[in-house]
Amino acid sequence: MKLYVAVALGLVGGLLLGLIAAVSGSPVLIAIAEGIEPIGQAFVDLLKMVVIPLVVAVIFVGVGGLGDLRRLGQLGGVALLFFAATSAVGVLMGMGVMQLFLPLASESAAQAVTAASAEAPVLPGPIEFLLGLIPSNPFQAAAEGALLPLIVFTVFFAAATGALPEAERDRLLALGNAVTAALIKLVHWILWLAPVGVFALAAPVTARAGWAMLQSLGAFILAVLVGLVVFVALVYVPAVRFLGGMRAKAFLKGSLNPILIAASTSSTAATFPAMLEAAEKELQLARTTTSFVIPLGTGIGRMGTALFQGAGIVFLAWLFGVPLAAAGIGGAVLATFIVSFTVAGVPAGGVVSLAPALGAVGIPLEGLGILLGVDRIPDMARTATNVTGILTAAVVADRQAGGIQAGGIQGSPAPGSRRWRR
């Protein structure tokens, strides 16, 4: 049985147990639902255990692997700027769309969960927040679970690593890759417990909230799906037309095959060969563009994931009764923006990597277990959106950089490239 099927069954089982307990009012069923809650907490603690080292490792490898940013050239600059800008827009759009859909969720669910959760921590003001981003002691930040300062330190350290001579850089990156591989293996092991963990998390919450929890989860899924469609329509389509000089109809037709593969596999990496073929044969982009932008995008192009995480932050903040102050939103956006670049290859990465953003806002990490159970459908949609964004970036970079190879070396366009037709 596929893991996502088992997780979905665990969620359904937990929801049914909690719902029957809530509707019937049976003291026995309510006691069972509440009695298994420590099992769910243990699952969340296992996720917490791996979050800090995993986030540090993947950010280090992702940023350090870019090398000296000065050497990326015009093509690399255009591609990175596009990925960064659209990821930031994705986070903010996800937050905005979820806010619009919150009236469809049931207030009873939020009241039930808030009543059972710990009091939200007091967030610092804007000045204190900005000063807190600089860790005076990175090891102390790690010990205290302060992920945002740790992320800032890791980004700087990884950028410095990328600027080292090749031999020294490769040694550090090899160590980082080995650590990342071991942590991903550990995440795989933990996620095999997800069906039981999600069951144990869903049952007590639903026992307290009843139908309201099902209604609220439905509102979240709908908000994510609508948000991704709007994101493609308002960001990617205009970018293709006005920055890439290509008709939207021709782009969508040429990109259809990799988009469908992405939706069916929920894997950007598995779609890589189809993206390369579509970019060169269907979209007729220069080979020097596709050979650089497509691999880069496969590693860091997670714009749909950024939107999903933005929606998840707002939904879980509402569910747990955590107010979203300006400093908290800024920290959540920063964490989501950085981590969305580095979740490639992490199992359930779109959900697991939400931890830094939730920590920045003060949302309990128990929310991760709730989102894991309903992740399959949003995962299919956001992976398709990620692939659409990678191909959009290739079209834009091909037009704006003129098929120039990374590092400023003129390359050869693919046969039939649009560059020949200009």
Image: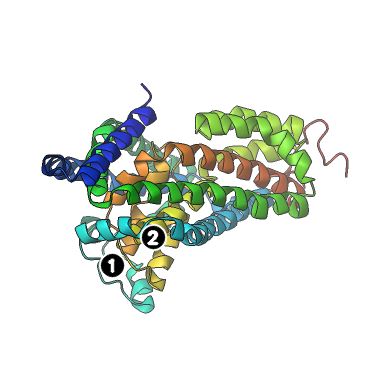
Task: Left or right? Give the position of 6 relative to 80.
Answer: left
- Residue 152's tag is 2
- Is residue 371 in sight in this rendering? yes
Nearest the viewer among 243 and 139 is 243
- Which quarter shows the C terminus? top right
Which residue is found at the position 35% from the left and 60% from the top?
A: 107
Residue sitting farthest toward the front: 24
Q: Secondary structure at mark 1?
A: loop
Q: CA distance from mark 1 to mark 2?
A: 12 Å
CA neighbours of label 2 inside 10 A, class few (<14), some (14 to 19), many (20+):
many
Query: Residue 64: in sight, yes or no?
Result: no
Q: Nearer the viewer, residue 76 or 282?
A: 282
Residue type at mark 1: give it. Ser
Q: Position of residue 149 (x, y in %)?
A: 33, 62
Q: Residue furthest top?
A: 1
Please give the name of the residue rendered at 17% of the width and 42% of the height, measured from the top-left corner. 33
- Secondary structure beneath disc 2? helix
